[in-house]
């Protein structure tokens, strides 16, 4: 059963495969403005205490599913 995807939301899990200190402590997915993103988070310590720092990377390319609404091209679309 597919769970609903809510816009501008995400989910993180503890990164059990963390191999290097600079690798994300948490990894997950987010949907922002209807587009899919990878979401990473690092647990940090600052002057005001512990906090999380986030990074988002759009899911596109050879190894990732194209986001919904991505344009599709045929060979006939190009004049050369």
Image (cartoon, grey):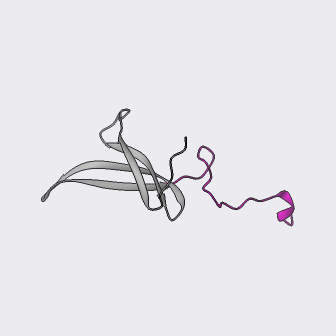
Return the residue nearer the eye: 22 or 76: 76
Q: Nearer the viewer, residue 37 or 31?
A: 31
Q: Nearer the viewer, residue 3 or 8?
A: 3
Q: Start and end of the magenta stretch?
A: 58-80
- The one of 76 and 35 positioned closer to us in this rendering: 35
Report x, y in % for residue 37.
Answer: 49, 54
Please provide percent x and percent y for residue 19.
35, 33
Give the answer, above or below, for where 64 lies relative to 46. Answer: above
Secondary structure of the magenta portion, mostly?
A: loop
State left or right for residue 39 relative to residue 4.
Answer: left
Q: The C terminus appears in which quarter of the rendering?
A: bottom right
What residue is shown at x 54% (from left), y 52% (from top)? 59
Asked which quadrant contains residue 21, the reply is: top left
Quarter of image, res 20: top left
Left-right relation of 18 to 78: left
Rendered location of residue 43, percent (x, y): 25, 48
Q: Is residue 15 inside the magenta stretch?
A: no
* Residue 77 found in image quarter: bottom right
């Amino acid at each position: 059963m597919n769970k609903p995807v809510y816009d501008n939301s995400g989910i993180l899990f503890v990164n059990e495969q963390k191999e290097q200190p600079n690798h994300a402590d948490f990894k997950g997915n987010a949907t922002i403005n209807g587009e899919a993103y990878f979401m990473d988070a690092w647990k940090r310590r600052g002057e005001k205490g512990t906090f999380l720092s986030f990074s988002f990377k759009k899911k596109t390319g050879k190894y990732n599913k194209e986001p919904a609404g991505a344009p599709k091209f045929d060979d006939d679309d190009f004049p050369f």
